[in-house]
Image (spheres, rainbow, N blue to C red):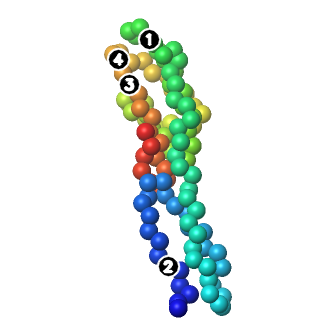
Amino acid sequence: MSSAHPLVSSALAFGLIWVLAGCGGGGSSPAPTPTPAAAPAITAFTAAPATLTVGGSTNLAFTFSGGTGVIDQGVGAVSSGGAKAVNPAVSTTYTLTVTPITGTAIV
């Protein structure tokens, strides 16, 4: 029996961090223990005021964790806990997307 660590594959939907304990040295080594990275989460995404008249302004506020955030409609990259003022000329839907460092986006 080999003391090499087996290969473990997994979908990268949320990425994985591999913790290797007891590798190296004599004797048998334990198998790697996969420790999932924290999944991206959107805690809050609000607009205040939520209803506007033409030419009005609103502030988008957002809180998220586990990745980098981007709001569509030209708003761009955002940091968690921030806010952005927007002035839509027509009815507009804004989408916050949080992408983990090594995985698939959460919308």
Asked which quadrant contains residue 63, the reply is top right
Asked which quadrant contains residue 27, the reply is bottom right
Residue at the front extreme of this rendering = 1
Query: Depth-wise, is mark 2 or mark 3 nearer the camera?
Result: 2
Q: How far, Cα to Cα, is label 4 from label 1?
A: 9 Å
Q: How far, Cα to Cα, is label 2 from label 1?
A: 58 Å
**Which residue corresponds to mark 4?**
91
Amino acid type, residue under disc 3 in the picture? Thr
**Which residue corresponds to mark 3?**
93
Q: Residue at x 44, y 11 (%)?
A: 52
Amino acid type, residue under disc 4 in the picture? Ser
Count of all numbered marks drawn on residues in the image: 4
Query: Depth-wise, is mark 2 or mark 1 nearer the camera?
Result: 2
**Which residue corresponds to mark 1?**
52
**Which residue corresponds to mark 2?**
6
Q: Is residue 12 above or below residue 57?
A: below
Amino acid type, residue under disc 2 in the picture? Pro
First-in-chain label (2 vs 1): 2
Q: Residues within 10 Å of mark 4 (few under 14, many from 20)?
A: few
Q: How far, Cα to Cα, is label 2 from label 4?
A: 54 Å
Q: Residues within 10 Å of mark 3 (few under 14, many from 20)?
A: few
Q: Is the C-beta separation of discs 4 and 3 under 8 Å?
A: yes
Please state, as top left, top right, bottom left or bottom right, where the C terminus lies in the image: top left
Q: Residue at x 53, y 91 (%)?
A: 1
Q: Is residue 75 left or right of residue 5?
A: left
| Image coords of residue 98 (percent x, y) | 47, 42
Q: Residue at x 52, y 46 (%)?
A: 40
Under tag 1, what secondary structure? loop
| Image coords of residue 9 (percent x, y) | 44, 68
Residue 37 visible in the snapshot? yes
First-in-chain label (2 vs 3): 2
